[in-house]
Amino acid sequence: MIASAAIRRQGLRLAALACVVALVLSVLLPGDRYLVRIFTLVGVNLIMVTGLSLLFGYAGQISMGHAAFFGLGAYTSGVLTKGGMPWVLALGAGVAVAAVVGLLLAMPSLRLKGHYLAMATLGFGEIVLFVFGEFESVTGGSNGLRQIPAAQVGSYAFDTPVAKYLLIWSVAFLVLIMASNLVRKRPGRALRAIHGSERGAQACGIDTRRVKVQVFTLSAALAGLAGVLYAHYVGFISPSTFSVSLSLVLVTMVALGGMGSLPGAVIGTVLLTLLPYADAILPGLSRETVAFLQDWETDIHGMVLILVMLFMPHGLAGLVRSIGTRLFAKRVRPALSRAGDTR
Amino acid sequence: MTMLSVRGITRRFGGLVAVSDVSFDVYEGTILAIIGPNGAGKSTAFNLLTGFDRPDAGTVEFEGLPLRGLKPHRITRRGIARTFQDAQLFDEMSVLDNVLVGTHVWTKTGFLGAALHLPGVSREERLAREQALHLLRLVSLEDLADSLAGDVPHGQRRLVEIARALATRPRLLLLDEPAAGLNSAETRQLADTLRRIRDTGVTIVIVEHDMGLVMEISDQVIVLNEGRKIAEGPPRIIQKDPAVIEAYLGGDDADA
């Protein structure tokens, strides 16, 4: 029974991956630039949300400052490539800066729990945003950083929308596959154990502080990676992109999809990223509706977060699971009653 | 041979002395029971031995080496596993995954290895799974392997926690009231399980209220009352000890 469950999970995983690949490629078919642009943003967000899902969804440690790591990656790589550094090196530097800052923030902050950790990371996000805005000689201040060159590997430049789209989604895929490997193995169990009971995890020999710092650093690095890709995709960055409201949206994406579920995080990311661009997917949508969604985007995110916390603590993934359990209830009950017999 | 040597441990909480100058030895291959009325300091003593709390005075040596200042995960890695009075299971994980977390002590796969699925990861994973399933069979919970730990009935939660503790491959196992909430049939089964565990070479210290269980399985008993050790000896002697009878009958816990 356990073996068959494992095979079923593996099968589901492959099917899910195949679906995502097919969907991602199908976006290119109509040759619609708007559609490609929107889904490129989905890819960028997905890289960030995957990292945040490991930190928040799996390990249960919130960060309200992930937009700052996104920004650190974007600015580092933007500034360096404008200074003439090859993109590949700037990519490494952007990720490294985000990771190192993440590590430095994590070491003192992860002693904190719950609201206190949220406040500390929130404050950190504000400080970084302030630096982006005030450090004009390097960052361009509130005017932002313009004419960031496209990503370039050797002599090949990713300078068309389709090339950029494929680059970003290739990275997103790699990140997603690695994350899904990770969560099903020893490190993933450590993360979930810390979420479940920190004392229990310690009693199992897990150095909870160390693992929390590791996963925070990893998720900061992934946000930095997304930042680098974003900067060279749009070519222009300014502080407003990396505000706390983005951090909040990322947290909402994880929560909406479901804590401790990567497929959930993917769905949450897709839904909330597409929300303001709903007309690209649903062509029949009236202009007023789209305008409403765009004007009220932040409020909708807030409402979604509140509603999920109140009524759907396990998010969409939890909803799907509980429907599945109800449909296959007959399969579950015998297992329980058999165990009851052993008393 | 002495496995654990506790000398004069004391722990004060404000004006209250929860554990006062307690000393005892645990011998390899035996089952030691710590009994006493509620509030006698038993759980505090456990926390002092496992690094979840620090003694104000006294020393603890395990296999000849002091445990002073070690964090809980280090002590587990030294070979001491424990369960909690309020089973600290990972409710959102399956029973099998709970036990697999216990294998972390002797498995190595890190973030990078798992993400890249480096060679050896699958092998280690398979080994850990075999071990975890074996331990679930030992506590007769193999049928619940795929259930969420949060859905497991109260009495069996403790068995999951015992299997998880064993997965760390301990040489000393500390159990905090494993029989609480079990009916008499379940308690008898628990006694069998504990003896089987002892027979695999694991030394056991058990904090327990159920005197029937204590008398049945333990080789040695120590009695705590108001933080002090008031008696020590084999179960048959302890049962007749006037100080012990006084402590129990004098306290609220006359049902023991």
Image (spheres, coloured by chain):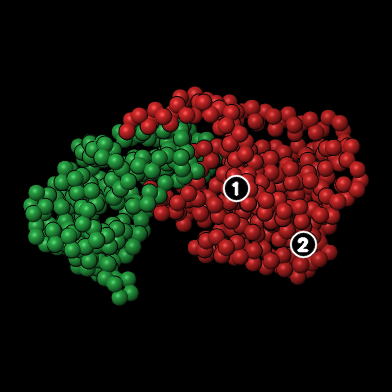
Chain colours: A red, B green
Task: Categorize mark 2 by other alpha carbons within 10 Å: few (<14), some (14-19), many (20+).
Answer: many
Question: Label 1 sits on what residue type?
Answer: Pro
Percent position (x, y) of residue B236?
9, 49
- Horizontal placement of B216 versus A46: left or right? left
Along the line of sight, the residue nearer the viewer: A266 or A217: A266
Check the residue under mark 1 and report the chain it is in. A
The residue at the point 79 percent across, 46 percent down is A275
CA separation in Å, label 2 and label 1: 32 Å
Q: Quadrant of the C terminus of chain A?
A: top left
The residue at the point 64 percent across, 59 percent down is A64
Question: Label 2 sits on what residue type?
Answer: Pro
Counting residues from the start of the chain, the first of labels 2 and 1 encountered is 2
The residue at the point 53 percent across, 50 percent down is A59
Residue A243 visible in the picture: yes
Percent position (x, y) of residue A2?
45, 27
Instruction: Please state which of the two labelled residues, at mark 2 or mark 1, is closer to the viewer.
Output: 1
Say which mark, if any, is on residue A239: 2
Check the residue under mark 2 and report the chain it is in. A
Residue beneath disc 1 = A313
Percent position (x, y) of residue A194?
47, 51
Q: Quadrant of the N terminus of chain A?
A: top left
